[in-house]
Amino acid sequence: MKNFLDENFLLQTETAQTLYHEFAKDMPIIDYHNHLMPDQIAQDKNFENITQVWLYGDHYKWRAMRSNGVDEYYITGAASDWEKFEKWAETVPYTLRNPLYHWTHLELQRYFDIHEVLSSANAKKIYDECNAKLQTPEYSVQGLLRKMNVKTLCTTDDPLDNLEYHQQIKNSNADVVILPAFRPDKAMNADDVPGLNTYIDKLAAVTGTAIADYDTYLAALKSRHDYFAENGASVSDHGLEQIYAEDYTEEEIKAIFLKIRKHEAISLADNLKFKSAMLFQFALWDHEKGWVQQFHLGALRNNNDRLLSTLGPDTGFDSIGDFPQGKSLSKFLNNLDLNNKLAKTILYNLNPADNELMATMIGNYQDGTVAGKVQWGSGWWFLDQKQGMINQINALSNLGLLSQFVGMLTDSRSFLSYPRHEYFRRILCDLFGTDVENGEIPYNKEWLGQVIQNICFNNAKTYFNF
């Protein structure tokens, strides 16, 4: 029987162990998509306690606690930080076979050198030990990033953000490069006409523009896209149910925009045309600047109206959707490619039924200009777990070039999430090691090591020009 979470965790063969420890383990990290707060990085914040850095905003843990019968008072309610941690510690033993169990104990080991299994029995001891360390300089936010050898990370930012914290970080000569990413979902959300009008008004105020029509709206958004580029951005991101690629004319979109500004209801057809026009325009700007565009597709969000009304979005009430993806995605990419305007692109699916669709779709738009120009992103959200990673790696291997893959990202809201890169690297090395020992690939250690290091870090560094 193997020991739990030892140095060879998830590494089932001697070859896998060699590949991980000699090549993958010490590679730096590029985290090209996450939801970390730039103000906390700029302030180099020291969290008061483990609950604040570990449980605040982590809807993965919140869902598990609710499933374990924990009252909302101890999750997002007014309970003390100690009480919230205690309830999480009580829940952890019940998360066996959920990735949270592995992540929890990897994070305790890697950040705090705590090798105990968390439970209610040792919760207070571990809480106090973590809290004491969190007060020291090496456990500041930037210290936590240094501890995990994070070199570059991209936050997720709305076009209205002034990026002041990114500017502060850049001027502070921090060890980690923190870059913004342009996330314009709210700017095209015609599902909510009142909300979109409020957004347009805010954009007008930020840009000092009188937004009277569609052309001035685009000009204002373009100025924000330019502003992001001036502040180091080279990545955009979109979180969508599916790609929008309806046929439309400029005259139609201008008329739809005027309806929106008059607070008039628009038809479903007009809604989809407006989203299609906006998405295509963002893609043109990304290509013009040489950016990488990312599309996170397939989340069915905000399913629980009762709890959404009290807790708001991004609190743990989203699920995998079953939206059709292939036809509109192909049309969108093809329309850009026909005009030689297709930027480097990363596609993420949330529904595992779309795995092979994505793995084959990216091959349609590789054109030899850039290795792996169109990427299928690592297992995202509900697929960000052992089997999800294995399935993604295997499908990409079978239908594309795993060797050109840009690798792992955290997509996280927690500064303690970086052992997820280690988790991915161990799984990657285990798959290669198993293939070697089964005689399916030759054991050219140096070449395999280079491929693994490329997937862990080098490919992303080259692809994003970081």
Image (cartoon, rainbow, N blue to C red):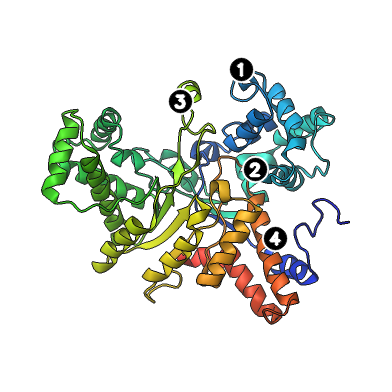
Mark closer to the chain start, 1 or 4: 1
Where residue 287 sits in the image (x, y, percent)? 31, 61
Mark closer to the chain start, 2 or 3: 3
Location of mark 3 (residue): 305
> Against 384, is 59 above or below?
above
Asked if the residues shown at circle 4 and circle 2 are in contact, with their CB atoms under 8 angstroms apart, the answer is no
Where residue 172 sits in the image (x, y, percent)? 51, 45
- Answer whether residue 46 is visible to the viewer in this image: no
Q: Nearer the viewer, residue 458 or 363?
A: 363
Mark closer to the chain start, 1 or 2: 1
The 10 Å Cα crowd at callout 1, few under 14, some 14 to 19, many 20 or more, is few
Location of mark 1 (residue): 78
**SS at mark 2?**
loop
> Against 353, is 300 above or below?
above
Residue at 45% over, 73% down:
371
Residue type (three-letter) at the residue carrying disc 4: Arg
- Tell me if 72 is positioned left or right of 361 in this view: right
Q: Give the spatial CA distance, label 1 vs label 2.
A: 23 Å
Location of mark 4 (residue): 426
Where residue 375 sits in the image (x, y, percent)? 46, 63
Q: Give the spatial CA distance, label 2 vs label 3.
A: 30 Å
The 10 Å Cα crowd at callout 4, few under 14, some 14 to 19, many 20 or more, is many
Location of mark 2 (residue): 416
Q: Nearer the viewer, residue 6 or 242?
A: 242
Residue type (three-letter) at the residue carrying disc 2: Leu
Residue at 59% over, 20% down:
77
Q: Which numbered mark, 3 or 4, is in the foreground of this view?
A: 3
Q: Quadrant of the N terminus?
A: bottom right
Q: Nearer the viewer, residue 344 or 69?
A: 69
